[in-house]
Amino acid sequence: MKALLSKAVGGPETLVLEDLPDPVAGPGQAVLAVKACGVNYPDFLIIQDKYQFKPERPFAPGGEVAGVVESVGPPLIEGGVTAVKVGDRVIGSSGWGGMAQKIVVEANRCIPMPDAMPFDEASAFILTYGTSYHALKQRAHIKPGDTMLVLGAAGGVGLAACELGHAMGAKVVAACSTQEKVDLCLKHGASSGVVYPTGEGGFDKAGKKALADLFKGAGGKGGFDVVYDAVGGDYAEAALRATAWEGRFLVVGFPAGIPSIPLNLTLLKGCQIVGVFWGSFAAREPLEHAKNTAELLEMYAAGKIKPYVSERFPLEKAGEAITHLAMRKAQGKVVVTMD
């Protein structure tokens, strides 16, 4: 099989396409013939050793895949049953290893795909919608009538947050770097949007105030009940200043840098700053995670949510796909396809 490998610490340009022996499923595992692999920001971080997990090299990036079960290993417990069988179409969560023609995945981390779901949408589904649904449901306790600001709203998790917020009865305001991206969000659940400056290199004092005023204007007199921050940097404090009394500020990601927040703002607003780590949640609370996944698939079947795949790259150009995402050029999801 072919795999795109990280053999040295570095950016996407360091990835190399090589032939490897086909993997073999161990106890409780399944080998998937990968059809598509979703591209996510952690893929950019993990190859630079900047992510929470640092796999042993060589490894392939790519934490979410869709494919067909090719083989299964023996059950973990004698007399037990493996969660999947040969021929099943599944979504697999692996952390890494997905940018390859085949991958070994723990069988209990495989989700049966709906018959009508294509592989590219399936590979763009669980990480983004899983993260955003956990954020809104378990962390923000969002309710109908809440107002929500989504930073980086046209990205994978941001667009999922727009759709889910709308489906859960919230009024969603999308914040993006261009009007084109705002327009996309308006088609995916946002009721309005704002265009923020890119602020390359950070904002000066006047720029920070102008950014806060922009978000405050979008939130109106009451402010936002929920802020979904998938951007970080100086945008975080500006958005926190637009948060309502007893608002919930969701910490999702930091492509603009890890922010420094003056904590007196949380006192003045009686608000919460809440971390969102979907992977840890899924591992620590598997029953709640399974319930979330079932509810997401029901929403997909009902047409309430649908992954927006803007671009597809072949495996040999997967490094370009990661670069495209890291440069914040992507809208919705970018997918690597194996066929």
Image (cartoon, grey):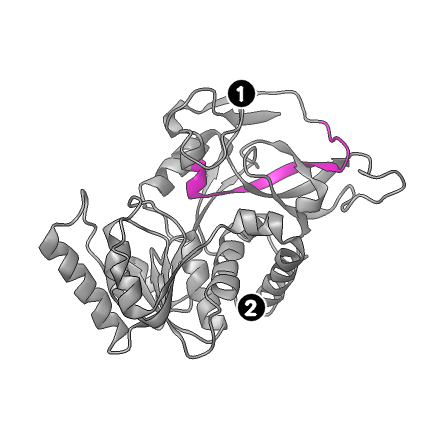
Residue tagged 1: 18
Q: Residue at x 56, y 32 (%)?
A: 97
Q: Let me know if residue 129 is in the magenta part.
A: no
Residue for point 44% across, 32% down = 317
235 left or right, relative to 227? left
The answer to whether 318 is drawn above or below residue 85 in the figure is: above
Judge by depth and name the residue closer to the eye, 54 or 2. 54
Q: Element under label 2?
A: loop
Image spot of residue 233 (x, y percent): 27, 48
User: Which of the labelled discs sits on residue 303, or is there none?
Assistant: 2
The image quadrant where one finds the C terminus is top right
The residue positioned farthest toward the right in the image shown: 79
Quarter assignment of residue 11: top left
Q: Earlier in the sequence, mark 2 or mark 1?
A: 1
Q: Is residue 149 visible?
A: yes
Residue 189: quadrant of the picture: bottom left
Q: Is residue 336 above or below residue 128?
A: above
Disc tally is 2
Q: In the rendered structure, which segment of residues is drawn in magenta?
A: 24-43
Q: Residues within 10 Å of mark 1 (few under 14, many from 20)?
A: few
Per the model, the C-alpha gap separating discs 2 and 1 is 39 Å
| SS at mark 1 in the image | strand
Hey, which residue is sitting farthest left in the picture? 206
Which residue is rendered at x = 22% and y = 69% of the image? 216
Residue 329 as seen in the image, left or right of residue 291:
left
